[in-house]
Image (cartoon, rainbow, N blue to C red):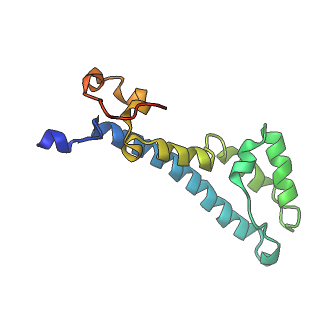
């Protein structure tokens, strides 16, 4: 019975936890950048709170082809700031390195095998466990 409790959808919990931990790490990295942006915008715009940009969209910045375009976009967003924004811009562009777009983080969660209950869509999860292929799959929808 304990063996059955250790598996979710024929995938050992150990594999599911590794994936969740990885996704959580990526999500936490993004949240840390968002928090950093908020805190630093508050500092930059002290005394001129009405001029704070409504949003610094991380995904829009990630979508830009290079750091030069990111710097240009940020300068446009922060043009009403009376304080020097160069350090903020340089640090933010550096922090965006390796940050994933929000939709990528969400799709990883949706495609997570524990959530979708379809271990056949996730070949990497049973790469080291060939016995999973021998389970009786009659009646299961295996189309993609």
Q: Quadrant of residue 14?
A: top left
Task: Give the quarter of the figure containing the N terminus.
Answer: top left
Q: Quadrant of residue 9?
A: top left
Looking at this rendering, what residue extends furthest in the front direction? 139
Looking at this rendering, what residue extends furthest in the left direction? 1
**From the viewer's perspective, is 105 left or right of 130?**
right
**From the viewer's perspective, is 62 left or right of 113?**
right
**From the viewer's perspective, is 34 left or right of 60?**
left
What residue is rendered at 51% in x and 52% in y? Answer: 28
Question: Residue 91: in sight, yes or no?
Answer: no
What residue is rendered at 79% in x and 66% in y? Answer: 53
Nearer to the camera, 60 or 85: 60
Q: Quadrant of residue 76?
A: bottom right
Percent x, y for residue 98? 61, 40
Percent x, y for residue 126? 34, 27
What residue is rendered at 78% in x and 70% in y? Answer: 52
Total number of numbered labels?
0
Percent x, y for residue 88? 75, 56
Nearer to the camera, 59 or 39: 59
Percent x, y for residue 66? 78, 37
Reply above or below: 142 against 112: above
Question: Residue 137: in sight, yes or no?
Answer: yes
What residue is rendered at 36% in x and 23% in y? Answer: 127
Nearer to the camera, 95 or 130: 130
């Amino acid at each position: 019975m304990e063996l059955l409790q250790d598996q979710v959808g024929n995938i050992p919990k150990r594999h599911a936890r590794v994936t969740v931990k990885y996704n959580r790490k990526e999500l936490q990295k993004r949240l840390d950048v968002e928090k950093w942006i908020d805190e630093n915008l508050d500092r930059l715009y002290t005394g001129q709170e009405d001029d704070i940009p409504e949003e610094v969209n991380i995904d829009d910045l990630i979508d830009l082809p290079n750091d030069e375009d990111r710097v240009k976009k940020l300068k446009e967003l922060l043009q009403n700031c009376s304080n020097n924004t160069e350090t903020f811009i340089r640090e933010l562009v550096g922090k965006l390195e390796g940050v994933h777009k929000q939709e990528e983080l969400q799709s990883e969660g949706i495609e997570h095998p524990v959530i979708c209950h379809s271990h056949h869509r996730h070949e990497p999860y049973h790469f080291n466990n060939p016995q999973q292929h021998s389970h009786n799959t009659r009646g299961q929808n295996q189309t993609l």
